[in-house]
Image (cartoon, grey):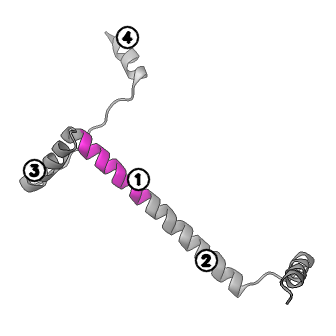
Amino acid sequence: MANATSRASRGRARAERLEARVTAEQKSLIERAAGLQGRSLTDFVLTSVQDAARRAIEEHSQLALSVRDSEAFVDALLSPKPINDRLRDTVRRYRERAGV
């Protein structure tokens, strides 16, 4: 019997349990939505929660990038790097092409 159990556990991950208490109104709403999509209540809830989790993670990632980018921009304004020869050449080429 132990061999059968260990073989089964190697083939797939053990399912975790997640529980939530909802009002009768919430459950009815969720059941109706699941039914409209032709899905089981469990499938509907898990898919909806996964989608919401991915969105929350993505929004947080974008916010973190936005904050980091803003900090880098402000830092560049407050502490500009000295002008080097490469930048001078770039400005010169731009002015030549733009006729400035």
Does residue 65 appear to the left or right of 52 in the view shown?
right
Residue 41 part of the magenta segment? no
Mark 3: few, some, or many residues within 10 Å (few <14, many ≥20)?
few
18 is higher (above) or lower (below) than 11? below
Q: Earlier in the sequence, mark 4 or mark 2?
A: 4
Q: CA distance from mark 2 to mark 3?
A: 47 Å
Amino acid type at mark 1: Arg
Query: Distance between the Cα atoms at labels 3 and 4?
Result: 43 Å
For the residues labelled 1 and 3, say whether their Cβ atoms are less than 8 Å apart. no
Kindly indicate the quadrant of the structure image that contains residue 67. bottom right
The disc labelled 2 sits on which kind of residue? Glu
Q: Secondary structure at mark 1?
A: helix
Is 29 placed left or right of 95 in the picture? left
Q: CA distance from mark 4 to mark 2?
A: 57 Å
Label 3 or label 4, whichever lies nearer to me, is 3
Query: Which mark is on residue 3?
Result: 4
Left or right of 30: which side holds 65?
Answer: right
Amino acid under label 4?
Answer: Asn
- Confirm whether the magenta stretch covers residue 51: yes
Q: Is residue 18 visible?
A: no
Above-or-below relation of 69 to 83 = above
Residue 54: which numbered mark, if any? 1
